[in-house]
């Protein structure tokens, strides 16, 4: 049998075999973080940049000890930034933190109630970051016109929300996600809102190139098992997309032939 | 030039600190017990690369940020 093949997931010239990207927030401890991420098979892992807690134990464990930059492609985010200036500063700090690594996840938020993207500030930040040599994977609304603008500017991946960050409400507007997928030449990833495995599979069935999630694994009752479920869901959804689903029909269509029935 | 017993006031991660004058950014990182840790330093909204911490002298009124990686999505 010919083995099933797929093209690698390619973003900003880097190639990956996993199409699941995961965050590192909200875990019980670093041991659980490391185990869940390993189980998910993710190769790209997001993290946040925050003030160092001064006066802390110098031997306190560091996230990057668990999620090693040698093993994973680290994707710093700009979570918590509400304007372009703060997001740009955060990306520059992240680049210094990672010795010049220039792939970032840009997210500029509108308010802390919805964490909905502020697209005006996102566009401003993207312009500055792209001019400064960053590869920008951008979290945005599921508005295809904004997505097109971000791609035209040079963002290397468009990442519309499925629903609000951390809500677990899945993909609320699959039609918009599909419009974005159909018009884009750069990878499209659903980022935010994934609640369970079927949501991740749906994103992939819509033709997304990948899925980025965090809370769905970290806040599952058993994060390690959910990490495995997400890995399988992304693979299953991808295969279903590549296979091309059957057409929907109004009426039933028997799988067993009519001909040769004993009552015929 | 500052004399060693002068002091300067600066803001470090949002809090006011008084330090001896004449320190470099590398001295400060050392004093904080963060030498060799994976951190990034910004002074007055400009990145100070690791290679330049030792040559960067702290001045009165500097706004310093020292950051590291934490869990996030």
Image (spheres, coloured by chain):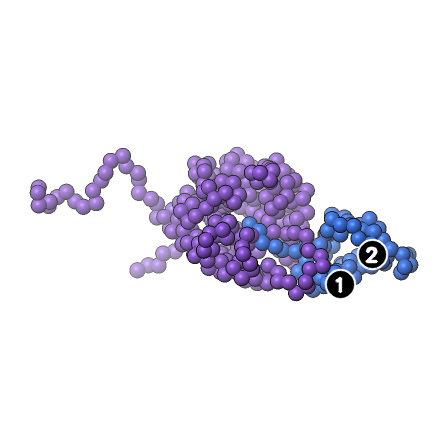
Residue at 89% from the left image edge and 60% from the top image edge: B4
- Please tell me the colour of chain A: purple
- Chain of the residue displaying label 2: B
Left or right of B21 on screen, residue A186: left
Image location (x, y in percent) of residue A120: 61, 35
| Callout 1: SS | helix
Crowding near the residue tagged with mark 2, few <14, some 14–19, many ≥20 C-alpha atoms within 10 Å? some
Residue assigned mark 1: B30
Q: Is residue A88 above or below residue A57?
A: above
Left or right of B35 on screen, residue A75: left
Left or right of A11 on screen, residue A1: left
Q: Which chain is blue?
A: B
Quadrant of res A171: top left
Image location (x, y in percent) of residue A146: 55, 36
- Say which label, 2 or 1, has the lower sequence index: 2
Residue assigned mark 2: B19
Q: Tell if the residue under mark 2 belongs to the same chain as the one under mark 1.
A: yes
Disc 2 + disc 1, Cβ < 8 Å:
no
Residue A114 - label: none
Image location (x, y in percent) of residue A240: 36, 48
Which quadrant is home to the C terminus of chain A?
Answer: top left
């Amino acid at each position: 049998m010919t083995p099933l093949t797929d093209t690698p997931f390619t973003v900003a010239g880097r190639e990956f075999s996993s199409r699941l990207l995961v965050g590192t927030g909200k875990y019980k401890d670093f041991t659980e973080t490391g185990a869940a991420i390993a189980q998910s098979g993710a190769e790209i892992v997001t993290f946040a940049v925050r003030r160092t807690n001064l006066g802390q134990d110098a031997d306190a464990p560091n996230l990057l000890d668990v999620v090693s930059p040698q093993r994973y492609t680290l994707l710093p985010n700009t979570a918590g930034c509400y304007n372009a200036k703060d997001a740009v500063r955060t990306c520059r700090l992240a680049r210094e933190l990672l010795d010049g690594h220039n792939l970032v996840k840009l997210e500029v938020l509108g308010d802390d109630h919805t964490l909905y993207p502020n697209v005006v500030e996102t566009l401003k930040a993207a312009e500055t970051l792209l001019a400064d040599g960053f590869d920008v994977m951008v979290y945005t609304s599921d508005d295809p016109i904004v997505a097109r603008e971000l791609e035209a500017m040079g963002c290397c991946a468009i990442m519309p929300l499925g629903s609000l960050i951390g809500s677990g409400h899945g993909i609320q507007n699959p039609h918009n996600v599909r419009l974005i997928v159909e018009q884009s030449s750069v990878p499209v990833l659903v980022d935010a809102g994934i609640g369970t495995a079927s949501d991740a599979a749906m994103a992939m069935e819509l033709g997304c190139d990948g899925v980025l999630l965090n809370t769905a694994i970290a806040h599952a009752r058993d994060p390690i098992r959910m990490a495995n479920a997400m890995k399988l869901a992304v693979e299953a959804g991808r295969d279903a997309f590549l296979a091309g689903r059957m057409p929907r029909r109004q009426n039933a269509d028997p799988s067993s032939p009519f001909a040769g029935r004993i009552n015929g | 030039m500052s004399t060693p017993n002068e002091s300067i006031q600066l803001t470090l991660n949002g809090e006011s600190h008084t330090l001896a004058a004449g320190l470099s950014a590398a001295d400060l990182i050392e004093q904080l017990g963060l030498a060799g840790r994976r951190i990034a330093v910004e002074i007055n909204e400009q990145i100070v690369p690791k290679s330049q911490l030792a040559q960067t002298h702290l001045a009165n009124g500097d706004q310093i940020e020292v950051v590291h990686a934490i869990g996030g999505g």
